[in-house]
Image (cartoon, rainbow, N blue to C red):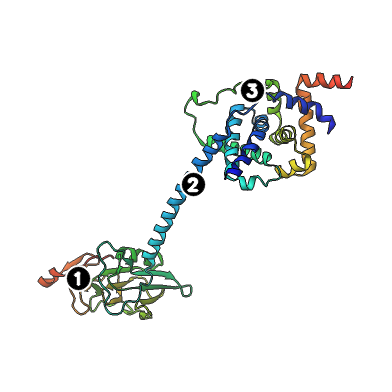
Amino acid sequence: MGHEQDEFADFYRASRDPCLRAVTAVVGDRELAEEQVAEAFTRAWMSWGKVRRHTAPQAWVVRTALNFGVSWWRRRRREVPLADHDAAAPAATNGGVDPALITALRRLPARQREVLALRVFLDLDTETTAKVIGIASGTVTAHLARAVAALRRDLPSANTNATEVIR
Amino acid sequence: MKEHDDIMGQVRESFSGLCMDMPVEQVFAAGRVRRRRRLSGLTAAVAATAGAVAAMTLTAGGPGPARPGNPPAPSPGSVQLAAFTVTSGPGDDNTTLILRKGPQYRLDPSALRQALAKHGIPALVTVGTFCRTKSGETASSGQLKHPPAKLADGADALVISSHDVPPGTRLSIGYFPNQIRMALIKDGAPLSCSSTFQQPAARITPAGTPIRVGKKANDIRMPGAVG
């Protein structure tokens, strides 16, 4: 147990930030993402014997966090709001992330966001991303291309950068 | 993929200040709590399973250990096994009823009646008494096609076909410590019940209410008569 604990602790320390960033990029809310990632790491620890053998354990955590979020929303959707005070509070600061980027990410379809997050924050290659999500490699490439194109269009700073690159 | 690097780099850079502060000890603590919950859930499940097994044993009335002669009376608080088993088959239309006798077995007449009803067999189950249609009011057949057979452990097994209990009749089962009596009775007909097979003790009205007849009959108890 001691060895496993050390191994998991190393994994956790190395993975928590990239996983949080990936999930935040997909869900667009830091607090919610933190809750989901914490739950996913707990599950990862509970199933560490299996997770450690996974092709991409960090991706397992991100997928678990996102799935947990989906079931959380499903549960919440069944609940009846009591009054205005039950409405979700506006997202907090999101850890200093550019609000324009968060808005632009939110405009992307969920699958594109997920592909982008796995590629950007976990450095997964196309094949692994495809395997983790369960889609074809070509689809991953297409999703990424569309996501990047949309962000390039929506983010003024990206356009500036692109212009600079062209120059 | 190089053509995406600028945007991907920008996204990466933008999120770089986002850090998770939760220490790993919190994950371990959450895992411990969850394991404890699982364990307690498992314990509860094991207890429930044990209870279910016990209940099944009670319902199934599995054969007890062979006891030559008269088995000793169970001590107070000892587990008593259900005295009956009702199963489907053999064949499509048949139901097998196994009844066991002895102090270690307890017959819940209501449970047996309900079990038989689930198999489509209406029954009147009585303990310590046996009810028949009064003479002259005999049910169409009056007798079951297949008489009870003795099993190796002394239990009585009765195969009842759905045709054995025609509409308008019920199976009357009288459960005694040392014997079991069965007959078909007519619905609505006055019944004659006795605490011994020979001696009629009480009549049961079509509604199933026992009518005590005579002084002697007042002494006759009909525990657990269920119709």
Residue A18 vertical position relative to residue B169 in the rendered view, above or below: above
Q: Residue B172 sits in which quadrant?
A: bottom left
| Dot 2 and dot 3 within a common chain | no
The reply, left or right, for residue A110 in relation to residue B160 is: right
The reply, left or right, for residue B30 in relation to residue B131 is: right
Q: Residue type at mark 3?
A: Gly
Give the SS element for disc 3: helix
Which comes sooner in the sequence, label 2 or label 1?
A: 2
Identify the residue at image location x=67%, y=47%: A53
x then y, percent, for residue A141: 79, 38
Question: Which residue is identified by label 3?
Answer: A95
Distance between the alpha carbons at the discs numbered 2 and 1: 58 Å
Question: Which residue is identified by label 2?
Answer: B38
Q: Residue type at mark 1?
A: Arg
Give the SS element for disc 2: helix
Marks counted in the figure total 3
- Quadrant occupied by the C terminus of chain B: bottom left
Q: Residue type at mark 2?
A: Arg
Closest to the observer: A108 or A96?
A96
x then y, percent, for residue A38: 58, 34
Chain letter of mark 2 equals B
Residue extending farthest to the front is A2
Q: Residue B64 sits in which quadrant?
A: bottom left
Q: Are marks 2 and 3 in contact (CB under 8 Å)?
A: no
Residue B100 vertical position relative to residue A155 in the rendered view, above or below: below
Chain letter of mark 1 equals B
Question: Which residue is identified by label 1?
Answer: B203
